[in-house]
Image (cartoon, coloured by chain):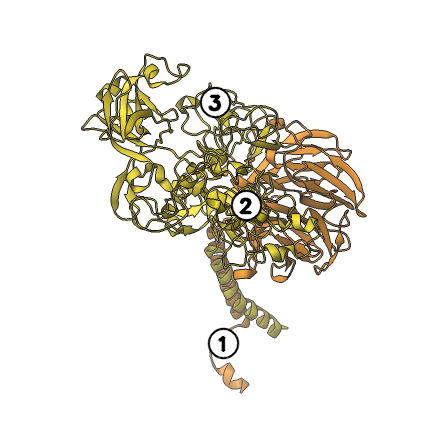
Chain colours: A orange, B yellow
């Protein structure tokens, strides 16, 4: 056998290897050239701007027909679930973090476990869910599965400690509630004892007209969305008025807001504010200088129609309830 | 070793071709990554309104104010500009300090940024450049209820008020005026199928009854409900058409054969226009209505209902222009010369040198509903003036008001309410056995006393807002210890029909009177004369107005 092969034309193995190598290099160079000539190389830092505005991530919808969200007013992420006040359906819809509907709780009424106008929603460290009901005039506490436990700070809704609750946030073991008709922000400890009361009806600094949302920054400063006065007011932890944020320099000029609603802070300290009637999401630094403005009117994924509630997670995911589009938008 | 080298190179070669090809293919066909959003706004924000032109100002209305037709700068809340075609009493003019810079309802500042909240300049999905909701309700309904749902703390349409409530429950047998835009105006019960109204197909929503930018009526009731200000009187509307101009130094005389309406060309002084608003020697044209003062005796009296202005525009379906729609206009016999005149719509007169040329005019007149009272409502010892209402409280400096429901059958008020409702519910606005002798017996709603609001709520009803004939509510009964009050009060009919009183107590409420026609059901006087002591019934004769039937 070996002799027969040797009888043919002799090809040196080295030549074979060299030929293969040349073909390999040639192909690599040819396709490499094509690759580089047709691809615009972007610097990685330009694609991921740590100081830029958040990007639209995804949308959360309810189900079809009677399962759909109807005027969702506020949203909160508590534990592994997303809780949305499905206000016109007088219930709370619960989604997993992927946005799939999991369960709902509540029905129309003024009894324990029932709602008339569920609005502000947030959770405590045990995963209990606190729901502000504007019409029933109470904050009810539910377990993570929605079972009614008790009323917060009141024995029953008839008590007037909390009259017309709108926005509700639980931050550092304190419960912050805006009382719309009383034009006040109420601060409670987790046992329901009232610690603090900020504001009264009026238009001067430190006064409110129908405050709809509240949040607190890392320094304990309290940010109140003063909807009827088209502004955000910032107070120190003692309730002392600090400044106004309304999109103008120093908060002294005309406001950019029309009916401002939800508010939140991300880990960078950016203050996000919803302008309901202009359908925008604004971002400001803590001094109120505008960083960016997103969305605007429409039904496309990065648009809103009458947005209202806003919630920001520890991971800087930004949830916005888009009331007339009947959905919750997530930005990151 | 050599075999291994051969194998390695072969594998490299085989892998290299598809790998490099794939890399080149993938990257050549994917869009290059770009920055997904515009750069953050970095230019310094200023207080200068003329530079207020960035993204937050959706219509980019900032710019050279010399090119902007600004409003009358003399109008203030203390001294409002009554000549303005629309008014909104609670707004502040020309105050560019403080938070009142985003008014939603009217008398906007000259640097306003409010329009784009509701109107889309180039992308409106509905008439009047309004945006539409994407789902169950239209843009008007969604926009109004963004604030009027209680989240601003006042005028919540979903809780009980003197207009009833939109927030009723099925258990309470709720019925509501379906203002979500789901229905068209022509679907109104009693709508006139023969109507010549050009906007009969419009969606019925909040703006069908309320003019958000202001009106001549209380509660911002629309100056032209269902467009009826511009429908001729002969067709049930409020417009007088082809009215002839009469020259006369004194009020023209009238007799049985005179025209119902004339336009009188005279001086402001002779027409009785307030000298504070118009010098007495100014030549004006005013509208005069023939009134029968005593039997067969007539005279012309000035008709001061505000005139309605509007652009003429084509009416029709999507493809065909059927008719041009005009509002108030004046003709010299051949041409429309309205633009040559100065028409003071709010005060209902026209002036300017060209009024000498006017031969005829069409006058579209506003609907005016006065729900104020001439009585002392708030008990401060002085009677309220027209359109003044009861102040419930203040939203900042803006008064939040309600109306006195006793006004609903006040002489001089009630009929305008029925006429207003009759803009859509046309056939219900009539007399028993109407003028054509149709032989149908019905409540004569074209009187001050039997206007629509006497029996019905405007917004909606349910068990929580209804009363029984004794004026008790569920809350009243529960307070008195009655446990099944809701079952007692809930309306048993298929529809609760926006009623103020449950079941047929809506009849019994009035037809238990002690005088006049309403006393016909009073078969004996035992109960009726002993209201105070007889627990079984009767009627409270001291109650405002309900038993006084001396006039109708």
The residue under label 2 is B164
The answer to the question of whether label 2 and label 1 lie on touching residues, with beta carbons closer than 8 A, is no
Measured Cα–Cα span from mark 1 to mark 3: 111 Å
Say if residue A314 shows up in the picture: no
Q: Which chain carries label 2?
A: B
Q: Residue A10 carries which label?
A: 1
Secondary structure of the residue carrying tag 2 is loop
The residue depicted at 50 percent of the width and 74 percent of the height is: A11
Secondary structure of the residue carrying tag 3 is loop
The residue under label 3 is B80
Q: Is B491 situated left or right of A192 in this image?
A: left
Q: Residue A96: horizontal and vertical position, in percent?
A: 64, 60
Quadrant, the C terminus of chain B: top left
Marks 2, 3 in one chain: yes
Secondary structure of the residue carrying tag 1 is loop
Q: Is A92 situated left or right of A297 in this image?
A: right
Q: Residue A85: horizontal and vertical position, in percent?
A: 63, 52
Marks 2, 1 in one chain: no
Between disc 2 and disc 3, the foreground one is 2
Q: Residue A253: horizontal and vertical position, in percent?
A: 58, 26
Quadrant of residue A13 within the rendered picture: bottom right
Between disc 1 and disc 3, the foreground one is 3
Measured Cα–Cα span from mark 2 to mark 3: 31 Å
- Between B29 and A191, the residue placed more toward the observer is A191
Mark 3 nearby-residue class (10 Å; few <14, some 14–19, many ≥20): some
Mark closest to the chain's N terminus, 2 or 3: 3
Q: Is B283 situated left or right of A239 in this image?
A: left
């Amino acid at each position: 056998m070996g002799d027969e092969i040797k009888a043919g034309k002799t090809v040196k193995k080295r030549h074979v290897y060299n030929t293969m190598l040349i073909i390999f290099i040639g192909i690599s160079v040819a396709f490499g050239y094509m690759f580089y000539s047709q691809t615009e190389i972007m610097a990685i830092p330009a694609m991921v701007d740590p100081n830029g505005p958040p990007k639209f991530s995804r949308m959360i919808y309810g189900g079809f027909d009677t399962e759909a969200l109807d005027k969702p007013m506020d949203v909160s992420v508590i534990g592994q679930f997303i809780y949305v006040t499905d206000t016109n359906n007088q219930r709370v819809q619960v989604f997993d973090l992927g946005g799939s509907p999991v369960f709902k709780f509540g029905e129309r009424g003024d009894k324990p476990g029932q709602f008339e106008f569920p609005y502000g929603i947030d959770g405590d460290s045990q995963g209990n869910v606190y729901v502000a009901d504007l019409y029933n005039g109470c904050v009810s506490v539910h377990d993570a599965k929605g079972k009614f436990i008790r009323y917060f700070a009141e024995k029953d809704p008839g008590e007037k400690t909390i009259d017309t609750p709108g926005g509700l946030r639980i931050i550092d073991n304190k419960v912050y509630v805006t009382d719309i008709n009383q034009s006040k922000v109420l601060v409670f400890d987790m046992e329901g004892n009232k610690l603090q009361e900020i504001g009264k009806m009026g238009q001067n600094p430190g006064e409110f007209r129908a405050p709809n949302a509240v949040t607190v920054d890392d320094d304990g400063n309290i940010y109140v969305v003063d909807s009827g006065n088209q502004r955000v007011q910032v107070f120190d932890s003692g309730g002392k008025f600090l400044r106004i944020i309304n999109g103008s320099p120093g908060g002294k000029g005309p406001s950019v807001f029309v009916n401002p609603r939800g508010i939140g802070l991300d880990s960078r300290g950016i203050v996000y504010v919803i302008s309901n009637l202009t359908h925008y999401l604004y971002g400001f630094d803590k001094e109120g200088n505008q960083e960016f403005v997103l969305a605007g009117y429409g039904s496309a994924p990065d648009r809103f129609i009458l947005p209202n509630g806003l919630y920001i997670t520890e991971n800087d995911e930004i949830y916005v309830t888009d009331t007339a589009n009947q959905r919750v938008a997530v930005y990151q | 070793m050599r075999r291994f080298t051969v194998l390695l190179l072969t594998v490299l070669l085989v892998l290299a071709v598809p790998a490099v090809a794939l890399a080149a293919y993938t990257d050549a066909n994917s869009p290059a990554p770009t920055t997904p959003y515009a750069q953050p706004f970095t230019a310094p924000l200023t207080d200068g309104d003329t530079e207020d032109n960035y993204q937050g100002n959706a219509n980019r209305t900032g710019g050279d104010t010399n090119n902007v037709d600004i409003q009358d700068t003399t109008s203030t809340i203390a001294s409002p500009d009554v000549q303005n075609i629309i008014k909104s009493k609670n707004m502040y003019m020309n105050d560019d300090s403080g938070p009142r810079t985003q008014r939603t309802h009217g008398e906007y500042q000259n640097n306003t940024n409010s329009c784009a909240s509701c109107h889309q300049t180039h992308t409106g999905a509905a008439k009047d450049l309004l945006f539409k909701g994407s789902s169950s309700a239209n843009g008007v309904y969604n926009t109004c209820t963004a604030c009027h749902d209680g989240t601003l703390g006042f005028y919540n349409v979903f809780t009980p008020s003197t207009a009833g409530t939109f927030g009723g429950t099925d258990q309470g047998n709720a019925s509501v005026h379906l203002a979500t835009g789901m229905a068209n105006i022509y679907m109104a019960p009693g709508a006139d199928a023969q109507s010549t109204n050009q906007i009969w197909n419009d969606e019925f929503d909040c703006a069908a009854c309320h003019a958000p930018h202001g009106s001549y009526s209380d509660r911002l009731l629309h100056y032209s409900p269902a467009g009826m200000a511009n429908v001729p009187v002969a067709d049930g509307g409020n417009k007088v058409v082809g009215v002839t101009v009469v020259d006369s130094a004194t009020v023209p005389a009238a007799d049985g054969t005179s025209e119902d309406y004339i336009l009188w060309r005279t001086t402001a002084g002779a027409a009785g226009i307030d000298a504070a608003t118009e010098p007495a020697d100014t030549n004006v044209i005013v509208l005069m209505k023939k009134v029968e003062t005593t039997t067969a005796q007539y005279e012309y009296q000035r008709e001061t209902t505000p005139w309605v202005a509007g652009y003429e525009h084509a009416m029709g379906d999507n493809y065909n222009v059927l008719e041009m729609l005009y509002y108030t206009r004046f003709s010299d016999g051949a041409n429309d010369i309205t633009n040559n005149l100065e028409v003071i719509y709010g005060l209902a007169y026209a002036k300017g040198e060209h009024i000498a040329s006017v031969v005829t005019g069409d006058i579209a007149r506003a609907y005016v509903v006065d729900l104020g009272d001439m009585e002392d409502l708030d008990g401060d010892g002085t009677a309220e003036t027209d359109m003044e209402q009861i102040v419930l409280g203040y939203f900042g400096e803006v008064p939040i008001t309600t109306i006195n429901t006793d006004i609903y059958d006040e002489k001089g008020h009630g009929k305008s309410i029925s006429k207003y409702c009759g803009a859509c519910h046309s056939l219900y606005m009539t007399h028993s056995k109407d003028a054509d002798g149709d032989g149908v017996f019905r409540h004569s709603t074209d009187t001050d006393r039997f206007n629509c609001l006497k029996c019905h709520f405007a917004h909606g009803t349910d068990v929580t807002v209804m009363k029984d004939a004794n004026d008790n509510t569920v809350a009243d009964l529960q307070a008195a210890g009655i446990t099944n009050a809701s079952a007692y009060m809930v309306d048993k009919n298929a529809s609760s029909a926006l009623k103020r009183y449950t079941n047929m107590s809506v009849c019994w409420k009035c037809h238990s009177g002690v005088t006049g026609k309403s006393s016909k059901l009073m078969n004996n006087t035992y109960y009726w004369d002993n209201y105070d002591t007889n627990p079984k019934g009767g009627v409270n004769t001291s109650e405002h107005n309900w038993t006084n039937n001396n006039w109708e």
